[in-house]
Image (cartoon, helix red, strand yellow):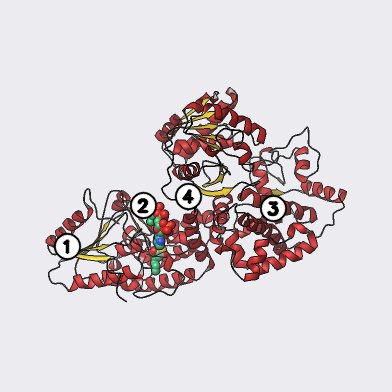
Amino acid sequence: MAAKPDSVQLDVRDGIAVITIDNPPVNALSRHVRQGLCDKMREAAGDPAVTAVVLACAGRTFIAGADITEFGKPLQPPGFLEMIDVLDDSPKPVVAAIHGTALGGGLETALACHFRVAAPSARFGLPEVKLGLCPGAGGTQRLPRVVGPEKALEMIVVGNPIGAPEALAHGLADEIVEGDLTEGAVAFVRRVVAEGRPLVRIRDRDDKVAPARGDSALFDAFRKKRARRMRGFEAPEACIRTVEAAVELPFDEGMDREQEIFGQLMGGVQARAQQYFFFSEREAAKIPDIPRGTATLDVKRAVVVGGGAMGGGISMCFANAGIPVSMVEMSREALDRGLATIRRNYENTAARGGITAGQVEERLGLISGTLDLEAAREADVVVEAVYEELEVKQETFRRLDALAPGHAVLATNTSALDVNAIAAVTARPESVIGTHFFSPANIMRLVEVVRGEKSANETVATAMALSRRLGKVPVLVGVCHGFVGNRMLFARQREANRLILEGAPAHEVDAVLYEFGLPMGPFAMADLAGLDLGWNAETSTGSTIRERLCEAGRRGQKTGAGYYDYEPGSRVPKPSPVVDGIIRKFAEERQLRRRDDIGRDEIFERLVYPMINEGAKILDEGIALRASDIDVVWVYGYGWPVYRGGPMFHADEVGIERIVARMKELEAAHGEEWRPAALLERVAGEGARIGAR
Ligand code: 3H9
């Protein structure tokens, strides 16, 4: 098949062939690009007037990788390796001119060139691991031969790109070009020709890998260091094995190993889930009824009301993004405590090497504390993070309405309350919106942007854009109790509580979710958050296990006891006979039938199916725009393992028909809360996938 006529161009400049790829938006290696590149390289090789080749890209970036939309379908020729071989076998010097990002297949293409020159801001990476893959066009064998196995492990297994100066230091870039990159590359390759520099192919190099041959210590240490972050993922370990192959095997055998591993990963569900998630994340940014380019407010100054854990974390987000922020508290003591916590957090990050001491002071310098809500007069955006009670929030908004300038966006960080009822107390409900950050707010990537019924398009667009500026992943949701994430969490929690009353030990309930890949189960999570959140000793009636635990002084990790016991100074949960007794007594009082045969499958279904069911209702009610948005919420907000796509992706993997059938059994056993949502029934009836909604 002929290449798309204009995606790869050849232009000969005084004996130097400049091949330019132009395949917006990111110059992915679509079939027509692979074809075009092979054709133009052969043309340049066959043209006696050409002495050398520059490979460059038009637009905002060098090649950002394979075209991920082609994955999952039979690969149309020419294949990646054919294209790579054409470059690798070139008898004439080839230099890649890199700007933007050379990622995945893009960097692999550059590694098949003899030289690489880069713009100062260029970035180099092999992020395939984030798509559940290993590099599959020779990158696993070539990169270690250039940068050595240690650096290659980091780049291939962790998947983060490095900048041009670092690439230069590691020999991945040969030169950094200030000014016009293509001209610089042409000049570079002319020098190569003039000096008659030998053309060494990376595949023929051994100097960087030979010293590590036969020594497994490097790999063992790396595995140990990354074990926690790799838990459950298939691709990182597979990537390590490809680098081991680069060290231990001759190039061609190493390539065979890479291809074998790449094929296995590509055929697996984790890669499918992670690629689905890549597009889901980008889809979440699109709001059908708000056109791209809708005006957004340029936020120059922020006010955060509340200096507790959430308010402090949100203030840090603004400071981290370089936006001056005033944090408002009610008492000097609370304010001082909040500011001290922020300082401690920054200092801890600096101690771990995350930021410099200078950055600590710079960021602290952007955060001012005040006891006076008058600060709102200066704000472009106000984020309210006060006590989670409707009246308290409404009172704050009444005051903000009187103080904040007319153009300001007024956001509430409620995690479950009615944003419309909050907006209604102001004279400008169109400027009010929910921005539900997740704890710890300075770390967690998710923000649920809650669109009130009167929120203006500009308000929504501003909240989305601002969240991105703060480094967050915003997902637009509608108003209902708990929005998307917490509403599903509440459904899971309800069943978790029932399970322990029916006889399943709390640690087994938690273990099922941990083994599935979540960071922790519901009871460990409750202990971490504190069981006394919203609990009041005066009004406590002992009507739930949680209340009884609080009454017994078991308030979670901070008191050394909650659903679990904790040794002094330890965060490791230990099953507690005391709690077991409290649960048994509670169940007896209520004459609940207890069983000792609650298996792991039942625990899993009873925890996860209610979430899926609630997700289906959320979708049907239009609270989430699409099933994939729900998955983005769960991956970024609650640590759902990305290699399992998200709860709605998982539902499709299990099969909606099967879920509906099982829910009907559970409905018969446990009552109507188990009735399948109408949408689940419809999707099951159609034999369809909920992910398509
Ligand atoms: C690979 O290379 C395998 C090989 O080893 C071997 C194969 C045998 N394909 O992110 P943005 C779309 S695996 C198709 O918003 P930014 C994206 O969906 C690949 N489409 O922009 C979006 O579309 P839309 C290894 C792609 O400026 C639009 O481009 N490479 C691809 O924030 C803009 O994207 C990677 O994993 C693609 N490869 O960031 C790199 N990439 O506008 C993946 C992007 O319709 N890409 N799109 O929503 C990225 O990390 C970022 O897109 C990049 C730009 C940093 C490049």
Q: Which of pointers 2 and 3 lies earlier in the amino acid sequence?
A: 2
Label 2–label 4 contact, CB within 8 A: no
Q: Which of pointers 3 and 4 lies earlier in the amino acid sequence?
A: 4
Q: Provide residue 627's location: percent of width, then percent of height.
A: 57, 58
Label 2–label 3 contact, CB within 8 A: no
Q: Does residue 247 appear in the picture of this structure?
A: no
Please tell me the numbered disc located at residue 290: 4
Q: Please, what secondary structure does the residue beneath circle 4 have?
A: loop
Mark 3 → mark 1, Cα distance in angstroms = 67 Å
Q: What residue is drawn where x is 83% and y is 57%?
A: 594
Q: Provide residue 14's location: percent of width, then percent of height.
A: 12, 62
Q: Which of pointers 1 and 4 lies earlier in the amino acid sequence?
A: 1
Q: Amino acid at mark 2?
A: Ile
Label 2–label 1 contact, CB within 8 A: no
Q: Quadrant of the C terminus?
A: bottom right
Q: Which residue is mark 2?
A: 162
Give the answer, above or below, for where 23 lies relative to 578.
Answer: below
Q: Which residue is mark 1?
A: 197
